[in-house]
Image (cartoon, rainbow, N blue to C red):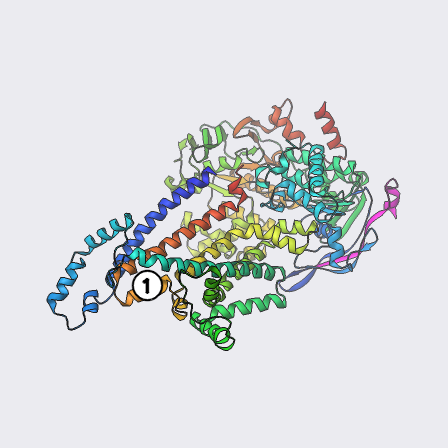
Amino acid sequence: MDKILKMVAQRLALGAVTLFVVSLIIFLAVQLLPGDLAEAILGQAATEETVAAFRRELHLDLPAHERYLNWLFGILQGDLGRSLANQRDISELIGKRLLNTLFLAALAASIAVPLAVTLGVLAALYRNSFYDRMVNMATLTTISFPEFFVAYILVLILAVNMGVFPSISNVSSDLGLWDRVYRSFLPALTLTLVVVAHMMRMTRAAIINLLASPYIEMANLKGIKRSRIITHHALPNALSPIINVIVINLAYLVVGVVIVEVVFVYPGLGQLMVDSVSKRDIPVVQACSLIFAATYVLLNLTADILSILSNPRLMHPR
Amino acid sequence: MTSKLANGGKGEVLLEMRGLRIEGQADEIWHEIVCGIDLTLRRGEVLGLIGESGAGKSTIGIAAMGFTRPGCRISGGTITFDGIELTSAPEETKRRLRGSRIAYVAQSAAASFNPAHKLIQQFSEAPVQHGVLNSSQAAKDAIDIYHRLQMPEPDSIGFRYPHQVSGGQLQRAMVAMAMACKPDLIVFDEPTTALDVTTQIEVLAAIKDIVHQFNTAAIYISHDLAVVAQLADRIMVLRYGNLIEEGETRAMLDRPEETYTRQLLAVRSYRRDESPPTKEDPPLLEVRGISAGYGPHIKVLDDVSVKIGRKRTVAVVGESGSGKSTLARVVTGLLPPYQGEVFFKGQALPPSYKNRTQDQLRQVQMIYQMPDVALNPKQKVRDVIGRPLAFYLNMNEAARNRRVSDLLEMIELPADFADRLPGELSGGQKQRICIARALAAEPELIICDEVTSALDQLVAEEILKLLQRLQDDLEVSYLFITHDLATVRAISDEIVVMLQGRVVQQGGKTKVLTPPHHEYTELLLSSVPEMDPDWLDDLLEKRAS
């Protein structure tokens, strides 16, 4: 266990370095965005003096490296800054939306991960059967369509024609859990359809990859049932690649949901970021990007730890 | 039937194969790999299947369980186990037999144990899944059998993962696992081939013991007649899927009828005398006081000194983990040592190959254990052998082609082999190409790292004869690394015996091989199986007293 704690500490430190580099890249990238907040807010009619005054007030007139350092020290003290567009505290602005996004991601993951792994195990078990081909075809179909298309089709069928789920997911913090799940169901389903194929195919491939191993032949020659061979002998040894793919998809559920949020008008982080880009609200864009980067770093760390926990060679050295 | 008379003391027929034919698929075409085999096995009887690779012995062994590997199919004949016809039985019937009434012991226990589960869980799996025992009974049984097999720490060893125990222990754990349901028949598929001779004895003794204790019938598959002779009541000699000869073990060893059987019996007879030591100063290669290892803590070699004279063969023997291959890595400069130096003709070689001159590199060449892995499958033989010619000797294409033909002639292969790919060659031919590649650099020393252990015995003997002839013609020296004492006997002038990174004995072949030996040399020498059915029993008795 000591080793794992040591590794976690090391990886967290590395993660901090990564985030530092990412913050630099984000800042530089945002500098490259065309346009200017002062002009965007004040409009074309504004005089040069008002624009200059506005800039001074928001510290936009300082040289880039000073603004970067100010921003960085702010973050280190837990202060993400203020939104330029409406002067609200960014942590407050983002907080709720981040929770909404995480809720949607968690809901989608709790459907998609068990579904994908089960489908993958079954596909490996009944390899090359009719079932296997059907699952492969169905999941490939859903991943091949653009997300917004899948989303609108679901809205058409489940919201407009059948009316079982609402087409707009206007969740708010005063809703009960079931109401929240009910209103977030369509975006979660859309996301599920998008991510299941990848995880399911990896599960299937990782298991099938192991079926030629001598210990699988040994299990066969011990007269073990095929279902048990797959779940008990192949799956535990295939966990590492499966975990990695799951985690990449979880990261996508947090970071890549922009379009789905827009379609369902879901008040999440992705939508906030898109709005802020169009408003030239640079501190909000930077804060969102940094949160997304942190999500990736943390999830990858989780994947590595789980891979180690699932490998007896690393858990029980000689 | 003659076997009935020969085995009058044994019980009723347990397994019967009649006209068994099995086909294997290669390049979309089905080839017959077992061509009509008849086999009868009685309760409590041990049948040895022997032959070289490609004889079909493993295929027949697992066919006894109604199983064929992927890419194989049973195309004819019958397999009857205790009244059940396996070729036509439904899969479920066969599954219920496997593990419970017929068990299997594989060649590589390290690969055949699931790395994700503890040994005792894997022991218990078959009895629990077949509904023979519950898991606490099975665990108790496991510990009992671990005791009977005299495994170290029998009460706790089962709670380790496969990677936490040594190769020999793992192989015994697999024998124990096969016994879990007290089966009527066990198929042993080369269970000791991957082990050192000293470990092989322990596993052989364990198998013999357990088979007798439970009166289990067994099919014992091996390429080594001397090993099979220790266990089998009756032996079947196979070649290319055909039966060559069948008979009671003693009768077959005393009076082999077929030429092929006689060849197998004679396989370890090749031997040459030690050539007289030459007084040379300085020697061709001198390794002085080498200590080396991997990383700062894992010391593999401890103060090793070896000298090799011109046109001499020095054999380095020892079990796996004794540091033989590490010594080769130090000599070639792949592993710079912590301490000590390597001298070539009196000149100190830089510790790392990176700092050696091209000429220093050329003078020491290597031949590896696995010719399959050592040859680039996409390169033609001409390119494989031509590469050192261009690299070390700067030959142009015409000169290279001439030299490749010469080299092929030297290794006794036709000149048109130059245009073949490694995939089109047999194992022995591939090893010959590796030898030619080493010779192409015109080295003065060739390091041979277990060059015959991946080959069938008859083929290995041809390779040894070839190496000897090349030494006579070209005056090259060999540093011959092997765990096989028969090979050492055959071609060495001097022997270096290694144990746990130290040299325990070294000297001329005759001196090392004639008593009194060092204790460990004695253990190694006495562990080599002999073509005598009583050898194992006698040896164990002698060691016990």
Front-lying residue, A270 or B239: A270
User: A271 or B427, which is in the foreground?
Assistant: A271
Quarter residue B119 falls in = top right
**Image quarter (top left, top right, bottom left or bottom right) of the C terminus of chain B:** top right
Return the x and y of residue B100 as percentages of the image width and height: 74, 47
Is B428 located above or below residue A60 in the figure? above
B115, B25: nearer the viewer: B115
Left or right of B531: which side holds A164? left
Q: Is residue B521 left or right of residue B56?
A: left
Find residue B322 and report its horizontal and vertical position in percent. 55, 33
- Looking at numbered disc 1 in the image, what kind of residue is underneath it? Met
Q: Where are the magenta residues, as a range?
A: B1-23
Write down the residue under mark 1: A273
Residue drawn at point x = 54 percent, y = 61 percent: A115
Q: Which residue does the image show at 36% across and 60% down from the upper left?
A: A97
Q: Mark 1 Cα within 10 Å, few/some/many (few <14, many 20+)?
A: many
Query: Which percent across, then down, holds residue B303?
Result: 47, 27
B19 within the magenta span: yes
**Considering the numbered disc 1 on the image, is that residue within a helix, a strand or a loop?**
helix
Q: Position of residue B527 (x, y in %)?
A: 67, 32
Q: Chain of mark 1?
A: A
